[in-house]
Amino acid sequence: MAPVKALCSERFQDWRSKFSSLGVKCKEYTGDTDENDLSSLSTYHLILTTPEKWDSLTRKWKDNKGIVQMVKLFLIDEVHLLNEEQRGPTLEAVVSRMKTVRGAICHTQRQTQEQHHNDSQTTVQNHRDVSEIGGE
């Protein structure tokens, strides 16, 4: 994520040429992007965006859960702008939201794993042995 569209465009041009030979697909997703089908973002490996655009996408993150869940690394260029009066609040909201989303996703995954474990206990007589082998 870069603070301005011009920097996103610059990084997009640079990284697209560098990473395309490795099969890494890049997407520029800024206010200039005319993207109505958000699910198409899931076909990209690198998404270069601005805080404002990512804020609008993730504000209702549960509606766009598939896209938000695919984020494995969230890189922020010019993170010192958190203290900047004009752009800082949006950047801070995005950073905070991504931490919240990651926590919710991890919590849901743990619940799913626990549920799977609990389900197996009702059908497996030696569930304690299985748990020890499984590391739980």
Image: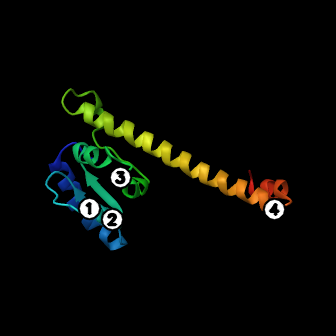
| Amino acid type for the residue under numbered disc 2 | Tyr
Mark 4 and mark 2 residues within 8 Å of each other at the beta carbon? no
| Amino acid type for the residue under numbered disc 4 | Val
Snapshot quadrant of residue 116: bottom right
Q: Quick one: label 3 or label 1, which is nearer the N terminus?
A: 1
Mark 2 or mark 3, whichever is nearer to me: 3
Mark 4 or mark 1, whichever is nearer to me: 4
What distance separates the C-alpha of mark 1 from that of mark 2?
6 Å
What distance separates the C-alpha of mark 4 from that of mark 2?
42 Å
Mark 4 and mark 1 residues within 8 Å of each other at the beta carbon? no
Q: What residue is pinned by disc 2?
A: 44
| Amino acid type for the residue under numbered disc 1 | Lys
What distance separates the C-alpha of mark 3 from that of mark 4?
37 Å
Q: Residue 124: which disc?
A: 4
Is label 3 in a helix, a strand or a loop? loop
Q: Quick one: label 4 or label 2, which is nearer the N terminus?
A: 2
Q: Residue 54 at what x, y percent from top left?
A: 28, 47
The residue depicted at 23 percent of the width and 28 percent of the height is 84
Q: Residues within 10 Å of mark 4 (few under 14, many from 20)?
A: few
Q: Residues within 10 Å of mark 3 (few under 14, many from 20)?
A: few
Q: What residue is pinned by disc 3?
A: 63
Q: What residue is pinned by disc 1?
A: 27
Is label 2 in a helix, a strand or a loop? loop
